[in-house]
Image (cartoon, helix red, strand yellow):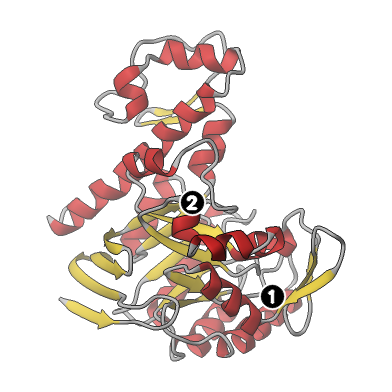
Amino acid sequence: MQCLLLGGRIGDDIMFEIVASHGNARAGILKTPHGEFETPVFLPVATKAVIKTLTPEEAWEAGCRGIIVNSLHLYRRGMELIERAGGIHEFMGWRGFVMSDSGGFQPIKKFPSEVGSDGVAFLMPDGKPDIFTPEKSMEVQEKLGVDIALSLDDCPAYPYTRERVAESVDKTIKWAERCQGRGRFAILQGGTFEEERVRCAKSIAGMEFDGFAIGGLCIGEPKEEMHRMVEATLPYLPKNKPRHLMGVGSADDIIRGIKMGIDIFDSAFPTRNARHGTIFTDNGRINLGRAKVRGDVIQDGCNCYTCRNFSLDYLNHLFKEKDPLGPRLATIHNLFFTNKVVEEAREKIKQEKL
């Protein structure tokens, strides 16, 4: 059993403890100011302090214990209301732990921002320019009151050149040095170039961070390349600190990541698919709103609210009618399904059967 005491201004009283392992897979406990949570764990995306279509209680009942928000989006909308409420947990009524992304990912999205030498420059809603330097990103995340803050990074859009990736690694390392502290995870970059992944990991692994997040993957590169980069990175990260794989949310990829030694995952994959009418089952995905979809049972043995109370026929009917209840019920199911995959993997690690 390995135990690591963490703490600090953002994530006080944090502890990571590995309680079981099987091969490279680990089962652990992440202790945060908002409770103790088992790992591996999946975090749904709540970019603007909401898991789309769900109340916080519905997400909790679906098995979610942590979420990831985006500090840049929340900052642009105004921090006053969140600070007045006493922090992000009180603002949105969430009782689990909260991780926040730093904003380095936004320039590759449809977002008015760009990466400069000293941070991420962007426009406020009123058109005024602003910038997230590493220090400002940490300051904003601290004001949000999150449990875990992520360092500012430079995430290049795929496809990219070797030169662009090397530049992003240089900035990510330099900015990580300015983001160090307790309750903070460092994001690692390197694209699909193993040498850059290793260089980034080696440079940042010894810095004062409580965990490490592998970023810049699952953004369009071949899936095998993604897994190869994770395998190349993990040997250079401290074994007694949590490892987070960003942007990965399919069941197959989560299981493969767990077997490699990943502890935390985040993704909009289950919720985005649900809103577009795709639900997950052990036998594959079902696309709702189509005439050929028929049946009483959505997923055999599933104990989520949706499966306990509604048939596949009814869910399909809701999507055909474009009723907002459809995406809501589908989101509950997909999150429950994803969290169940992680929970079962955790138990198999403890039983040495994964």
Near mark 2 (Cα within 10 A), the count class, few <14, some 14-19 or many ≥20, is some
Residue 182: where, in percent of width, then height?
A: 41, 83
* Residue farthest left in this picture: 351
**Position of 168 relative to 350 (above/below):** below
Residue 330: where, in percent of width, then height?
A: 46, 28
Identify the residue at horizontal 55%, vertical 63% (top origin).
84
Identify the residue at horizontal 20%, vertical 57% (top origin).
349
Residue 225 in view, yes or no: no
Kindly identify which residue carries mark 1. 165
Q: Nearer the viewer, residue 27 or 336?
A: 336
CA separation in Å, label 1 and label 2: 37 Å
Identify the residue at horizontal 23%, vertical 54% (top origin).
346
Looking at marks 1 and 2 on the same chain, the residue that comes earlier in the sequence is marked by 2
Residue 344 in view, yes or no: yes
Kindly identify which residue carries mark 2. 92
Tally of numbered tags: 2
Q: Secondary structure at mark 1?
A: helix
- Tell me which corner region of the image, top left, top right, bottom left or bottom right, holds residue 120: bottom right
**Position of 240 relative to 61 (above/below):** below
**Which amino acid type corresponds to the residue marked 1 in the rendered image?**
Val
Residue 183: where, in percent of width, then height?
A: 42, 78
Q: Nearer the viewer, residue 212 or 324?
A: 324
- Tell me which corner region of the image, top left, top right, bottom left or bottom right, holds residue 59: top left
* Image quadrant where one finds the N terminus: bottom left
Identify the residue at horizontal 53%, vertical 67% (top origin).
144
